[in-house]
Image (tube, rainbow, N blue to C red):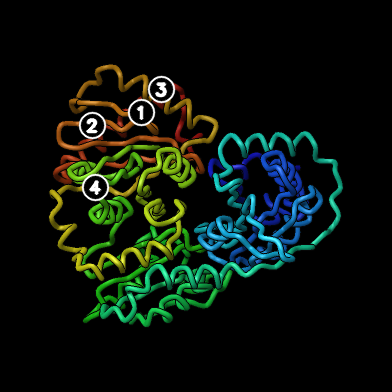
Amino acid sequence: MIEKAIFRQYDIRGIVNKELNEENTKLIGYYLGLEVKKRTIQTPYIVVGFDIRTHSQMLFKALISGLNESGCIVLNIGLVATGVNYFASYQEFDIDGEKIKPNASVMITGSHNAKQYNGFKTTINNDPYFADDLITLYNTIKENQDIQIKDNHNFIEIDAKTLYIDYMVNQFSHLKNLKHKFAIDCGNGVADTVITDILDALNLDYKALYTQANGDFPNHHPDPSNEKNLHDLKNLLVDDCFYGFAYDGDADRIAVLTQEHNIKGDILALLFSKTMKNPVIIGEVTYSQNVFDEINTHGTTIMDKTGYSNLRLKLKELNADLAAEVSGHIFFNDRYYGYDDAIYATLRVLELIYNGMNLDEEINKLPKSYTSENIEIAVNEEYKFSLMKKIKELITKTQRGFPIIKEIIEVDGIRIIFENGWAIIRASNTNAILLTKYEATTQATALTYKKACENLIQKAKDELNITSNENK
């Protein structure tokens, strides 16, 4: 029996041997392969890569058995970062004297999740395969689970890593011998399947932590959005080592540190925008208002939903220059292919430094404000979206003691604009939680907004008879 819960908003992901196993992975490969065939004219070639998790090889064999059963041809690129997987889907490969361009890609990865998780990030014709497509795939598998898929581990091995490394070294050849020391933390993920080769070829001066890929992640959890996972990297940022870069398990998400700042994705978008002419930047709903305002002085911003697949699709749809999530997914359409790749983002940050930008000075020019981290409120999955509907209903009515509302934006949940800041309340697309965040000119004002919104959420729960026990 295959569980719907593993078909998430942006990818397929679950606990291996509990929610995701050899049997249902074969089914995923088979019916995914049939879907790829529907969207292509000739026999489809599918790039498949995997991360370092201890079960990735088992899932790889099961997945390609299904893909082979469907009539697709598997191009195996081996142990890679997700950016290399995406990169490969844009390249041509010489196969038996014929130039072949892949039609789809699958990356086997648990990303930043705990080590017992794994899953699949998929593109077809270089568009993310997510949301309704994944639900359709689930329904197809659910209704057709009796098919028997034999083991078939045939594939064509291709070298995407060398192409990727050569591309990066060529594109950033001007950084060679850069006289700025920095540090990287690969978190025992797959970043160093390519990154130190690139940095060494450019003769850059860096210190490296936890480069050895290890699916048990022995040094710290591979999630750079959590401050506690940056402790060792921060300890290297002393004396003349001013910059640090950290990566999640599959190296599509980045954290950028200076001795003074942990630079979130929205601030990175602002810094990159300063090097572009009339840039169009797509930001998600949790951006600081200061970032939107500042970019709009020299370019155009578009507010969109959170989620890496949403942003990648919107970037392509609008042919914008860049999109970024606060969490560290950075998508460059300017001089690149429009997908999230933390290795490439590292080189673009180093390019800012090469061109003379003082990152700390640029950040310190922004108006002072207090911005909270994302705050999670547990809620039963069954009630998550009905609770958001009730909150939206209540916010349209005058609430006693509630701060004056200037505007309500419903791009993703509700972003409530107040006189001196904003708050956001939205349902997570991947977990049984509501997410809230607050920004104001002072911390005290932000806490006022937080208290008012928490009271509103509680009132919505009360009206729906959602008890605290149901939220555990």
Q: Earlier in the sequence, mark 4 or mark 1?
A: 4
Query: Whole-Å distance between the Cαs marked 3 and 1?
Result: 14 Å
Query: Whole-Å distance between the Cαs marked 2 and 3?
Result: 19 Å
* Badge 4 amino acid: Thr
Q: Mark 2 points at which residue?
A: 417
Secondary structure under tag 4 reads strand
Q: Which residue is drawn at 53% across and 69% down?
A: 190
Query: Whole-Å distance between the Cαs marked 2 and 1?
Result: 11 Å
Q: Which mark is residue 339?
A: none
Mark closer to the observer (3, 4): 4
Query: Whole-Å distance between the Cαs marked 3 and 4?
Result: 26 Å
Say if 206 sits above or below 3 in the image. Answer: below
Mark closer to the observer (4, 1): 1
Q: Name the residue under label 1.
A: 410
Say if 102 sits above or below 343 in the image. Answer: above
Q: Name the residue under label 4.
A: 371
* Badge 3 amino acid: Lys
Say if 152 sits above or below 138 in the image. Answer: below
Query: Whole-Å distance between the Cαs marked 4 and 2?
Result: 14 Å
Image quarter hosting the N terminus: top right
Question: Alpha-carbon neighbours of circle 1 within 10 Å: few (<14), some, or many (≥20)?
Answer: some
Q: Name the residue under label 3.
A: 390
Rendered location of residue 206, percent (x, y): 35, 80
* Badge 2 amino acid: Ile
